[in-house]
């Protein structure tokens, strides 16, 4: 059984090696009791090591290790809002980041349910207002939205997703990225998303993640 530290490093490498994060963007966290292990600020997910992870509490306060991600407060907000979630992943994956910059999106439902897998793994995707990275002013809106949604899109930035496990959060953020890609590919074509009834039949219950 991998430790939480090893799980974070394995997920970080996987995201980086597949181009889902670049440079020193993105951050990951895993709940450990009433503490949270989170990647340190300024680190590359391609090279960060298990011994370099930071520990915060659920208020977002730094407890031990190097200075945590500047988004530690957001990770803590999602974990507070979703007591059954145990992991949070944030990336700047290209297609989701592109959608986060588009004008005219429905802020309550930023991507249509193009596929069943999106409806199952992501559900509805709120678009949160723009705040500079690390601006704690985003915390209350993120916490409120996360009570009823496991995935959020940060305007002009990228997605952040909570899951019951790190594997579940990765599945969901990867599905969000693939659906953003489909959405951009299909922009000039007539498309037929799932109906509201088809969508509702597949959406995760808020309690399940
Ligand atoms: O976009 C940003 O600057 C952050 O949201 C980010 O992705 C990386 O920040 P750190 O985790 O503080 O390195
Ligand atoms: Zn970011």
Image: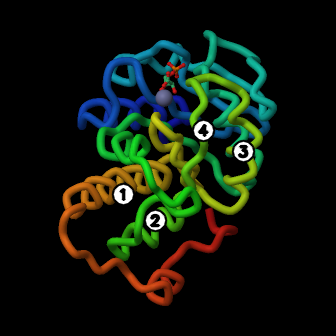
| Number of numbered tags placed on the structure image | 4
Q: Of callouts 2 and 4, which one flags the residue occurring earlier in the amino acid sequence?
A: 4
Where on the picture, by quarter, is residue 64?
Answer: top right
Badge 3 marks a residue whose secondary structure is helix
Badge 2 marks a residue whose secondary structure is helix
Q: Of callouts 2 and 1, which one flags the residue occurring earlier in the amino acid sequence?
A: 2
Rendered residue at 55%/17% (across/down): 40
Mark 2 to mark 1 CA distance (whole Å): 7 Å
Front residue of 19 and 9: 19
Rendered residue at 25%/31% (across/down): 17
Residue lying at the far top in this picture: please name it.
66
The residue that mark 3 highlights is 141
Q: Of callouts 1 and 3, which one flags the residue occurring earlier in the amino acid sequence?
A: 3
Relative placement, left or right, of 14 versus 168 is left
Instruction: Give me the disc on residue 175.
Output: 1
Residue 22 drawn above or below residue 40: below
Q: Of callouts 1 and 4, which one flags the residue occurring earlier in the amino acid sequence?
A: 4
Q: Is mark 1 within 8 Å of ligand 2?
A: no
């Amino acid at each position: 059984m991998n430790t939480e530290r090893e799980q974070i490093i394995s997920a970080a490498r996987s995201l980086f090696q597949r181009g889902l994060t670049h440079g020193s963007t993105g951050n990951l966290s895993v709940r450990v009791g009433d503490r949270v292990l989170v990647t340190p600020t300024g680190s590359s997910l391609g090279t960060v090591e298990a011994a370099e992870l930071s520990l915060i509490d659920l208020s977002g306060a730094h407890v031990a290790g190097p200075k945590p991600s500047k988004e530690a407060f957001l990770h803590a907000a999602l974990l507070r809002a979703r007591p059954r979630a145990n992991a949070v992943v944030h990336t700047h994956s290209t297609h989701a980041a592109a959608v986060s910059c588009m004008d005219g999106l429905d802020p309550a439902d930023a991507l249509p349910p193009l596929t069943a897998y999106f409806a199952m793994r992501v559900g509805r995707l709120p678009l949160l207002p723009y705040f500079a990275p690390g601006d704690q002013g985003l915390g209350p809106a993120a916490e409120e939205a996360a009570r009823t949604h496991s995935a959020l899109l940060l305007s002009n930035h990228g997605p952040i997703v909570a899951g019951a496990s790190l594997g579940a959060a990765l599945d969901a953020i990867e599905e969000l990225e693939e659906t953003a890609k489909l959405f951009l590919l299909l922009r000039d074509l007539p498309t037929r998303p799932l109906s509201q009834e088809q969508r509702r039949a597949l959406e995760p219950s808020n309690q399940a993640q």
